[in-house]
Image (tube, rainbow, N blue to C red):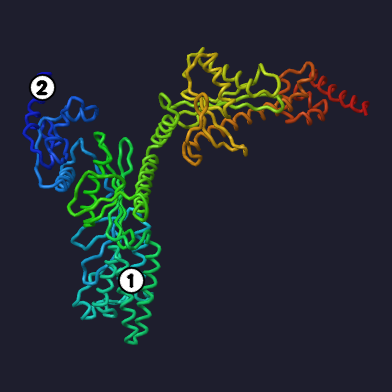
Amino acid sequence: MTKEENEKRLAYLKGIVARLPEKPGSYQFYDEEHTIIYVGKAKSLKSRVSSYFHTEVDRFKTKVLVSKIHDISYTVVNTEEDALLLENSLIKKYNPRYNVLLKDGKTYPSICVTNEYFPRIFKTRTINKKWGTYYGPYSHIGSMYAVLEIINELYHPRTCRQPITKEGVATGKYKVCLDYHIKKCLGPCMGKQSYEDYQKNILQAREILKGNTRQVLRDLKEEMLQLSEELRFEEAEEVKRKYLALDGFVSKSEVVSHTINNVDVFTITSDEKTAYINYLHVSNGSINQSFTIEYKKKINESDEELLQLGIIELRERFNSKSKEIIVPQEVDVELEGVKFIVPKLGDKKTLLDLSAMNGKQYKFDRLKQAEKLNPEQKQVRLMKELQEKLGLPKMPYQIECFDNSNISGTDAVAACVVFKSMKPSKRDYKKYNIKTVVGPDDYASMKEVVHRRYSRLIEEEEPLPDLIVADGGKGQMEVIREVIQDELNLDIPIAGLAKDNRHRTNELLYGFPPRVIGLKTDSELFHILTQLQDEVHRFAITFHREKRSKRALQSELDNIKGIGPKTRDGLLNGLKSVKRISEANLDTLTDLVGAAKAQIIYDYFHEEKGQVTEDK
């Protein structure tokens, strides 16, 4: 598009904006092909739409949206609530490119009560309202099974799929199945349970599915007392069994005071790309609905905007008529006859916290599911988290960690392990024999190794790490800093892993002077860092053991003049140990290394034995 064409486009759009009314409504943006690319709502159409064309708009994604707009239409409504409803329906109808994308979890199961002569009650993921009434969907499968279990225990609805008619029952067309004999069905198909009694049970089951369990309890209690007055004690005992079973179920499912009735609860959990809105419905103190929807952000929508959209979507979906809505923040929207509450204390705050916990758990579950399908996603997330925690200039793709190992300064070694993308890169591991340090001086050893490592990387023009992690606290960090910054003049971030008095890693340190970084010790990121620490320990100790074992194994043979490494290795490969070499006869040694060298070895060990005998 040329500059002249763009100016003409903007002039046309601003002409439309100038004519917009100061009334609530929904507006639609169209692209060059007259396809709806964005739907919005506003208390004042003119004020809201004109804000898109202000020169001070600083959101990049909003600027991109505006650059695609070629036409604007709008619909005026009476109230802001109507504007919200219209916006929601248009988004679902047209799925505009720049609106949030609703990932609504339609695969969650619901409970169906069929429209049959003798209704059945079962779980399903297929919704066809011609078949019956649906309750749900249930995002927490355990809750759904708990409800089905109590209904089956109390009312024994039939499970057979055969179509049963009134005429068929009257003519004796059906026979009872196994469920009747094991007392899981009362045999309505053969008239062993009356139609009226079966329908009364289904009516009570519907009330339980709606969450009206306390009303069912009151009805059962009244029925039990009535039967007792009529001296129908066996029937009263059966009703009492139902009452106790349902009362036990209610006591487990009730989470707040039963005085809280017919209340909706909404919370939002969001990040840069996604928002998760959790919905709870509370009736008689019990949660009878819990559901979370997911919105994919397109143009940096605010939490308030998304929460408004989620409230309208979920109340419409679950046909909620609650006059009280609990929310975590003030919502700039008015719904007719509805009161919004932001609780700070008490039972309503408990419900709000519970909703937030469900939203966070849903987000965590979705994240884990995505990471199973794409393991790299988890690594990027952890690198971003570490970058944010430490304030690093870029994601720490390559992390290196050092450790020393010696016994009283003998056989001193060091090791460097490398993690790339939060995973061990074993081909990049390095072993070091300490060359310039005498005695057990860990700081001096660390200084030598770090200098050798990074001076060589500079010389060979190899990539430097994005982060160095010191296996220790402030002392080790300072030694590494002296080499990196003062001697080599490099700018590599340095962190440290400090231990408590039980020698357990409990803190992540960063900066100079070092400060403690807030990181939970049971978090995934902390586990990765301790894995890095454990790996460098393992690698250093393994190298140290190999060196000690090699020295102990070979020292005796190295002392024999005229015997070189090749002869030594041949002897060890053939006889496996110095002890067996010392005890071998001349013929055995000759077969392995030849007569001349065999004589030298034989004389050495036998002369040594003689000397030991004389000393005694």
Q: Circle 1 — which element?
A: helix
What type is the residue that disc 1 sits on?
Answer: Leu
Q: Position of residue 256 (x, y in %)?
A: 37, 59
Q: Nearer the viewer, residue 182 or 440?
A: 440
600 versus 578 height, above or below: above
Q: Earlier in the sequence, mark 2 or mark 1?
A: 2
The alpha-carbon separation of the residues under discs 2 and 1 comes to: 70 Å
Label 2: how many Cα within 10 Å (few below 14, some 14–19, many 20+): few
Residue at image mark 2? 7
Q: Is residue 584 left or right of residue 366?
A: right
In the drawing, does residue 285 fall left or right of residue 444? left
Asked if residue 273 lies left or right of residue 436, the reply is: left
Q: Please state the horizontal and vertical placement of residue 41, each as a whole percent of the image.
A: 16, 41
Between residue 118 and residue 404, name the one nearer to us. Answer: 404
Residue 444, compared with residue 349, is above or below; it is above
> In the rendered image, which quarter is residue 382 located in?
top left
Q: Of helix, strand and loop, which one carries label 2? A: helix
Q: Which quarter of the figure has residue 142?
A: bottom left
What amino acid type should be assigned to the residue bearing mark 2?
Glu
Q: Residue at x 12, y 19 (%)?
A: 2
In the picture, the disc for residue 297 is none
Q: Position of residue 506 (x, y in %)?
A: 55, 37
Q: Position of residue 105 (x, y in %)?
A: 28, 48
Residue under label 1 = 217
Q: Is residue 427 visible?
A: no
